[in-house]
Image (spheres, rainbow, N blue to C red):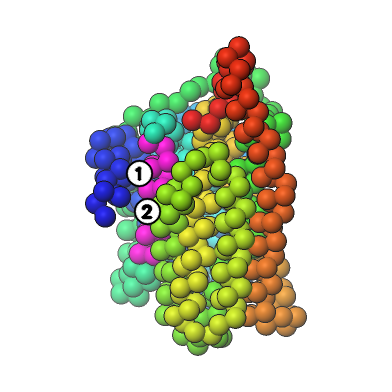
Amino acid sequence: MLKKIQPYIDLVSQNHNYRRLWLSQVVSNFGDWFGLLAVYALITRYSDSEFLLGLIIVVKMLSLAFFSPLAGYITDRFNRRRIMMICDGLRAMLMVAMLLVVSYETLWMAYVFTALQMMLSAVFEPAKTSSIPNVTTKEELVDANVLSAASWSVIFTLGMGIGGLATAWLGTDLVFILDALSYILSAWFIYRAVIPQETMSKAELKRTRNPFVGIKEGFQYLINTRRVLRPTLAKGCFTMFLGALTYMLILVSEEILLMGSVGLGLLYSARGIGTGIGPIIGRRLFPDEADWIRVMGLCMIFTGAMYVIVGLTTSLILMLVFVLLAHTSSGANWVMSTVLLQRRTPDTYRGRIFSTEWLLFTLAQSASVLAASALLENEIFSIQQLLMIFGVLLAGAGIIWGMTITRQEHHYQRQLRQQRDVPEEAGIQSGHTIA
């Protein structure tokens, strides 16, 4: 067991800059999840409207989505280390500002502060993800992303649970203050890290001084560079159906298991564990990165099949097992697509590419949840039927992925092999090789 985790221990103990960036992620992610339930509690305290509670989720998603293009431009044009510290400082201030929400009349401020918090997160996340290749070696990059994904899953599970208990025992005000302190601690870790960054040339800085020009160039680069476009689509295609499936776990706990928040906590814990161990399993089963685009389609098929089984059972134990299995492949898909984007994208475009990926992911998730909720609201399908339908659709998406995206990648990999076999052509595509 120690041998399996030794690479991650070595990475954290020996690479000081990655360790500080990783600790920043751990602390800020914990703050995100820790404070989430406090916001929900604040809304339910001053209003019994289900619409207002659902509206905060929509505000979070749309704020991330609409600000993502500008966020990517910012993270490519300016110093990412400084940007992340500024984002953390401003998010801490917003959490303290939540203390101003003291009545139904002031409840609107919670939505404004949440929207601003998500806009800052839209800047922070691509800046962080774009920085990982700059503080790791090529050999460390996969380990670094696997560790980040595993940390996210652990923090997701613990943050939600501890946040719920803290909100009940300490009250929302103290939770918001602790949340603010977590962002300050995150900024301190980043301050102590050295994060190199390839800067734009003077000509490029001048050409893209208009944000719309910079954003447009990022989209053009993505559309014209298919080796980058393929992994960019992976998370969005996955969550187009998985978003609805994870949303329906809330209803499964309420209406099928009749266990309320306890059942939801168990199901989401299974989801978190699966997401954490999936990248580790995926890396061991598929060590060759040239196979990863194909594996992404297989992951969609596997996750869809697992959720079909979830829809067929009413047993809590079986649900926990198959939800866990389903999210092992979704976690593997997440890390594989992230690593390929980090390897294939130049540093000066990386922020815009990751923010575009986040935009696609957020829009696909929003559409998925809205479609599922509308179908259930109008009683067109039962929860179990819709679980199976979306599971089949996800598996179908994986089959289509294999027939289209995988074939394009296979052609690309064949070209790379041919270029490596011809010495005089070996240098032509050196920027396109997969390390």
How many callouts does the rendering have?
2
Describe residue 170's horizontal placement relative to residue 205 as left or right. Answer: left
Q: Please identify the quarter of the rendering in which residue 163 is found.
A: bottom left
Counting from the top left corner in percent of width and height, residue 204 is at 61, 19
The reply to whether the magenta stretch includes residue 179 is no
Q: Which residue is drawn at 72% across and 73% down?
A: 374
Counting from the top left corner in percent of width and height, residue 422 is at 61, 17
The residue wearing badge 2 is 151
Q: How far apart are marks 2 and 1 (CA)?
A: 9 Å
Label annotation for residue 22: 1
Amino acid at the residue labelled 2? Ser
Q: Is residue 377 in view from this perspective? A: no
Nearer the observer, 42 or 66: 66
Counting from the top left corner in percent of width and height, residue 416 is at 61, 27
Counting from the top left corner in percent of width and height, residue 366 is at 65, 60
Point out the stretch of residues depicted in magenta.
140-159
Q: What element carries label 1?
A: helix
Q: Residue at x 46, y 75 (%)?
A: 320
Amino acid at the residue labelled 1? Trp
